[in-house]
Amino acid sequence: MVELDLRVNNMSGSLPPELEYLTQLESLRLVSNNLTWPIPPELGNLTRLKTLDLRFNDYSGPIPPELGSTLHQLKTLKLSGNALSGPFPPDLSTFSSLEILELYNNALSGPLLPEFGQAFPQLRELHLRSNLLSGPISPAFIKGLPHLERLALGANSFSGPIPSEIGELEHLQYLSLGKNSLTGAFSPDLIRNLVRLTHLYLPENSLTGPIPPEIGNLTRLEDLDLGGNPLTGPIPPEIGNLTQLIRLWLFSNSLSGPIPPEIGSLTQLQDLVLRHNSLSGPIPPEMGSLTRLESLSLSANNLSGPIPPELGNLTQLVNLYLGGNSLSGPIPPELGNLDQLIHLNLDYNSLSGPIPPELGDLTQLRTLDLSLNDILTGPIPPELGNLTQLVSLNLGWTSLSGWVPPELGNLSQLKSLYLQGWLLTGMLPRDLMKLDNLSTLVFRNQELCAPPDDEFQAWLSGISHVDGPTCTGVQFAVPIADQSFLTGQPITPLVLPEAVVGVAPFTYTLTPALPTGLSFDASARTISGTPTEVAPGRDYVYQAIDAHGSDNRLRFNLEVLPATPVSFEHTVPDQSFPRGIPAAVTLPEATGGVPPISYTLTPTLPTGLSFDASARTISGTPTEVTAGSVPYLYRATDAYGLAASLQFNLEVYSPVATEHELRPESFAVHGNYPNPFRQSTRIVLDLPWPARVNVEIMDLTGRCVYAAPPLNLGAGRAHDIRLSGATLPSGIYLYRLVASSPEGQSTHVGRIVRVR
């Protein structure tokens, strides 16, 4: 028997020592069983063995020294995932043919003696992570492993500096030294020559100093983890050279300065974690180029400025953590494009303005935290009720106002809801009673309260943690929406809400006086009538007073608009003016609306033209040609801010050209194409006048090697001259183009490349 493979067979017990009689055995694999007891020393008699793989069993005790005394042909030894203990065995040093040594996930202890490395001259892979090894990593140990491709010593107790000799392992592709007690600076010598490295793991040590800019030389790197060290200084912009990088983890350091915009060059990146540093400045909009990114964590830094809307391009993003910074400005609605997003944390910032309703499009979202943005204003958008996978919603300690939308009752998976703050008002909507999975509900420190009826209170009692008051005194169950009516049209009677908490009877009032034609019936709580005059938007207070004098108020806005809104009966045709010739055009007058009507035109007109808003006229003599048709917006706004607009294009052209075929104003050569070329190339030029054109090709010594026949060309754009170079040797040449006309002579010299 030459090979014995019993992997994943659910075997138990111990290995029989009789295996020693299989003297022709070259490969023994017993991976992922339940074998126990020490490894039998009799395996040392299998002197032809080249592969011994006993991974993921329950072997304990030391590695038997007999393995090292006789198995001189062994190339692969894998004993990982057991409970082996004792020191790193010195008897393994006789394995001069060993290429792969895997001992990770055991309990081996002690140092790596210098002579160990010298005993493994052929070793390509050394995996010792997750043991109890300690002491320094000896430079002599590293020097003895010149062919090493993979070195994994992570999750041990190694101390002292990382030996710079690792930087001399020119074949190294994988280096893992994380989760040790290594100290000292992150030396450039460590990585200077590791140009084949694809994975570099140094997290959770005590490495100091800056990240060396030489990191940018590791252009094959796919995975870089330096997290959990006290590294300082900026993120070097050279990191943008690592265009193969898939994962970049620099979390929990003391890195400072801005995030380099060069990070936007890492277009293969899927995981970017920079949290818990001292990074400052804005989030570079170049991050919007990382379209493969799945996780972005920038939380707990000192970042400032707005959230760039370009982050809305990261449509593969699953996790977005930007909390614990000083970010300001609005939440960009473009974040609503991130339809794969599961976690969105923007807490502990200075974000302002309303919550964009587009966040309701993030239907995969499970956590949404916007808390502690104390200038986040406006209502809670009802669109958040679309987030049916949401487990946690935190809107606490903001300046959000208004009532809690009943649509939040659609969040059937919700377990935590935080609404504490200052400006939210009214009773909690009864729709929240549909939240069967809710275990935490916090709504204290504002005018929110829970309905006092037995049904709602019984539902509250089933929630593990509730922090908020029960309604007392007069309360309304629903708010009043803002109202907008048209003059001369009877309104549908509007019944205002009835008080649901308090001591009857209730008295209702509405202030101030309603617009002409409308009235309020307090006994029926109804606004009705036909408004006869336009009235601008105005805030109204609806008040209910109970028999004990307790009261409550609802506020809403009411306006009366003209029955005929401002509009245009005619469009504006596109305008085209010749340069240097007086022009005038009157734009249409708006109809409807409430006078006076004001007019605006944007953007600024070309030089020499002006807009008279009172006469609605564009006039003047244009002095400059535009690059093309420019779009303009003509807008009419009435006295109450209602508006209508028209759009048209305007251009100024040269008077010596027609509208669609402009004569160039100057001589220009636009180069040649293709360049380099094989058989022929073409030169493109503009002529403002008729000309005789000669073209010569010269070598670098100035000797003419080709002359094209002279051409008589008329004035015009994009003349195309073909040059044949099939007989020319490969190389670099110069061409000279001379255009002769009654206006004079113009010359252009360029460079072309001939390849075979």
Image (cartoon, rainbow, N blue to C red):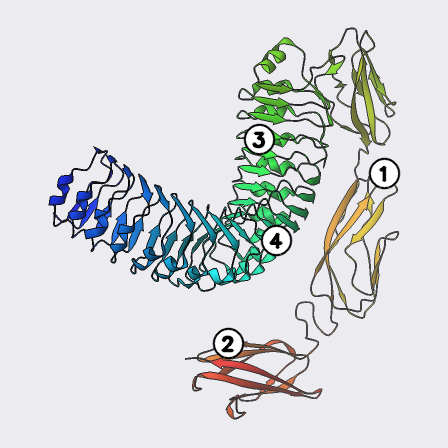
Side of 104 relative to 471 (left or right): left
Which residue is the site of mark 1? 594
Give the percent coordinates (x, y) of residue 579: 78, 69
| Residue 246 visible in the picture | no
Which residue is the site of mark 2? 675
Q: Nearer the viewer, residue 585 or 506?
A: 506
Label located before the other in sequence (2 or 1): 1
Quarter assignment of residue 10: top left
Find the distance from the CA under tag 3 to the CA under tag 4. Answer: 34 Å
Q: Residue at x 87, y 40 (%)?
A: 595
Inspect the image, locate mark 2, and give the three-letter code of the amino acid beneath it: Asn
Residues at discs 2 and 3 in contact (Cβ within 8 Å): no
Q: Residue at x 54, y 35 (%)?
A: 365
Give the percent coordinates (x, y) of residue 427: 69, 19
Say if 51 sits above or below 403 in the image.
below
Element at label 4 = loop
Q: Nearer the viewer, residue 241 or 114?
A: 114
Label located before the other in sequence (3 or 4): 4
Find the distance from the CA under tag 2 to the CA under tag 3. Answer: 56 Å
Say if 341 sits above or below 97 in the image.
above
Side of 347 relative to 673 (left or right): right
Find the distance from the CA under tag 4 to the CA under tag 2. Answer: 39 Å
Q: Which mark is residue 386?
A: 3
Inspect the image, locate mark 1, and give the three-letter code of the amino acid beneath it: Val
Side of 647 relative to 312 (left or right): right
